[in-house]
Image (tube, rainbow, N blue to C red):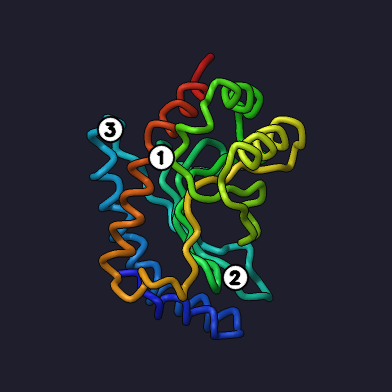
């Protein structure tokens, strides 16, 4: 189960050492959590999502600066479509619904964002860059700015959900963290469905 000690994998400065720690200490928790989430989401989505663990295959010199798993409707991948991502930076846990800049059907998904009432989006924070731990508090202004950037800047992402610092009191009880992750993903499910409808629209 994810806990404050999960962040200790980032203390290893070497590529093989950090990868080994991620694979043995974090990935099993990700797999368990991923399976739990797919079961929780099934009644809402009426489909079983697929769990994709980050493999860090492109890492040949520097150790990974973050690690994660994704949930998507495709067995073959997740980056090309709306998906959920749960993962760790050295100081943050993130629980997000993510649209990447190079996703397929980008234009029609981007246009569909105009129909979404920002007040109905169950997010605490928002970001335009999945490759950074930087984020902003969610508000009408940050939603509009992030949506506009996603629509106009080709490499921009749209990432929204919750970031929890490793020193947050909730990490005192791993069960609380597990419940927080589950609740955030369940809350984001209706928005995920709306984005997938736009993605699948021919």
Give x and y (percent) for residue 66: 56, 67
- Label 2: which residue? 64
- Label 1: which residue? 188
Decide which of tag 2 and tag 1 comes sooner along the chain.
Answer: 2
Residue 147 vs residue 24, the one in the foreground: 147
At 31% across and 58% down in the image, what residue appears? Answer: 33
Callout 1: few (<14), some (14-19), or many (20+) C-alpha neighbours within 10 Å? Answer: many
Decide which of tag 3 and tag 2 comes sooner along the chain.
Answer: 3
Give x and y (percent) for residue 88: 49, 66
At 45% across and 46% down in the image, what residue appears? Answer: 84
Q: Are marks 3 and 2 in contact (CB under 8 Å)?
A: no
Is residue 37 rendered to the left or right of residue 154?
A: left
Tag 1's secondary structure? helix
Q: Name the residue furthest top.
A: 202
At 63% across and 63% down in the image, what residue appears? Answer: 58
Q: Which mark is residue 21?
A: none
Instruction: Choose top left, top right, bottom left or bottom right for residue 174.
Output: bottom left
Q: Is residue 25 above or below residue 102?
A: below
Is residue 177 rendered to the left or right of residue 14?
A: left
- Label 3: which residue? 44
Callout 3: few (<14), some (14-19), or many (20+) C-alpha neighbours within 10 Å? Answer: few
Q: Are marks 3 and 1 in contact (CB under 8 Å)?
A: no
Residue 145 vs residue 79, the one in the foreground: 145
Tag 2's secondary structure? loop
């Amino acid at each position: 189960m994810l806990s404050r000690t999960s962040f200790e994998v980032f203390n290893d400065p070497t590529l093989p050492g950090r990868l080994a720690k991620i694979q043995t200490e974090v990935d099993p928790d990700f797999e368990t959590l991923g399976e739990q989430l797919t079961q929780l989401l099934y009644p809402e989505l009426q489909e079983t999502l697929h769990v994709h663990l980050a493999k860090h295959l492109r890492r040949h010199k520097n150790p990974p600066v973050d690690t994660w798993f994704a949930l998507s409707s495709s067995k073959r991948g997740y980056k090309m479509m709306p998906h959920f991502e749960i993962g760790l930076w050295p100081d943050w846990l993130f629980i997000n619904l993510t649209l990447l800049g190079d996703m397929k059907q980008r234009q029609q998904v981007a246009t569909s964002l105009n129909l979404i009432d920002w007040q109905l989006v169950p997010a605490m924070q928002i970001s335009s860059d999945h490759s950074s731990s930087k984020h902003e508090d969610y508000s009408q202004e940050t939603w509009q700015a992030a949506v506009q950037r996603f629509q106009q800047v080709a490499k921009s992402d749209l990432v929204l959900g919750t970031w929890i610092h490793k020193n947050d009191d909730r990490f005192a009880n791993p069960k609380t963290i597990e419940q927080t992750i589950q609740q955030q993903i369940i809350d984001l499910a209706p928005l995920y469905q709306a984005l997938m409808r736009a993605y699948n629209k021919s």
